[in-house]
Image: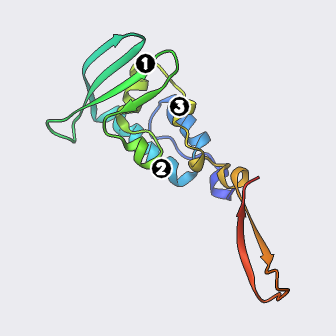
């Protein structure tokens, strides 16, 4: 972990979920996630909310996207959550619509399912190492990088 990642960043909202994000994500991803959290606070409004079969369906309007309603489904039993914008599927961190739905549901920590291992502070230390290995022909001039999982 780099020195910058060990320092706690300045919060821009008073939401506990922002502190939780800062404790999990690398600094660069945290700033992207923080932007989504801030937008959830400032630019979202609830269009409709329906709870059926232990699933909360939030219809959310984004003030920056005219004539579009985003649908967020939150399973109250498993905390599985998905959004019709598919940002999480594309980039691996939650969108503003998901953060807004979590806020409406009084969930103050990011559900484990939304914490992609590749964006975690400990991803490099935990999931890979880089070794320099001499080629089998004995030539010390030729080295190759090999990535292995722990």
Give x and y (percent) for residue 64: 22, 41
Q: Earlier in the sequence, mark 1 or mark 3?
A: 1
Instruction: Name, please, the residue furthest toward the front.
Output: 137
Q: Classify 117 as above or below 98.
A: below
**In front: label 2 or label 1:** 1
In the rendered image, residue 135, in percent from the top left (x then y), is placed at 79, 81
Element under disc 3: loop
Q: Quick check: marks 3 and 2 in contact, CB under 8 Å?
A: no
Residue farthest toward the left in the current orientation of the protein: 67
In the image, taking residue 144 as reference, residue 53 lies left or right, namely left
Q: Is residue 69 above or below residue 29?
A: above
57 sits left or right of 130 in the view:
left
Q: Which residue is mark 2?
A: 31
The first of marks 3 and 2 along the sequence is 2
Which residue is under mark 1?
Answer: 105
Distance between the Cα atoms at labels 2 and 1?
23 Å
> Do residues under tags 2 and 1 come within 8 Å of each other at their CB atoms?
no
137 versus 38 height, above or below: below
Q: Residue at x 31, y 35 (%)?
A: 84
Disc 1 residue crowd, few under 14, some 14–19, many 20+, Cα 10 Å:
few
- Up the image or down, 2 lies above or below 21; here it is below
Per the image, label 1 sits on a secondary structure element best described as loop
Label disc, if present, on residue 110 of the rendered structure:
3
Q: Tell which residue pokes out farthest to the right in this image.
A: 138
* Total marks placed: 3
Quarter of the N terminus within the rendering: bottom right
**Residue 143, picture quadrant:** bottom right
Q: CA distance from mark 3 to mark 2?
A: 15 Å
Q: Secondary structure at mark 2?
A: helix
Q: As rendered, which of 57 and 104 lies closer to the eye?
A: 57
Q: Earlier in the sequence, mark 2 or mark 1?
A: 2
């Amino acid at each position: 972990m780099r020195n910058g990642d060990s320092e706690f960043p300045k919060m821009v909202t008073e939401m506990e979920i922002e502190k939780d994000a800062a404790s999990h994500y690398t600094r660069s991803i945290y700033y992207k996630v923080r932007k989504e959290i801030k937008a959830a606070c400032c630019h979202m409004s609830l269009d409709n909310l329906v709870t059926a079969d232990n699933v909360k369906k939030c219809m959310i309007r984004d003030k920056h996207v005219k004539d579009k309603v985003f649908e967020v489904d939150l399973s109250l039993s498993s905390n599985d959550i998905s959004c019709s914008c598919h940002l999480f599927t594309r980039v691996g961190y939650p969108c503003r619509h998901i953060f807004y739905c979590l806020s409406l549901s009084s969930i103050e920590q990011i559900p484990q399912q939304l914490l992609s291992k590749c964006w975690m502070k400990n991803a490099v230390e935990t999931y890979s190492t880089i070794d320099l290995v001499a080629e089998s022909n004995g030539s010390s001039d030729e080295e190759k990088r090999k990535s292995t999982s722990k």
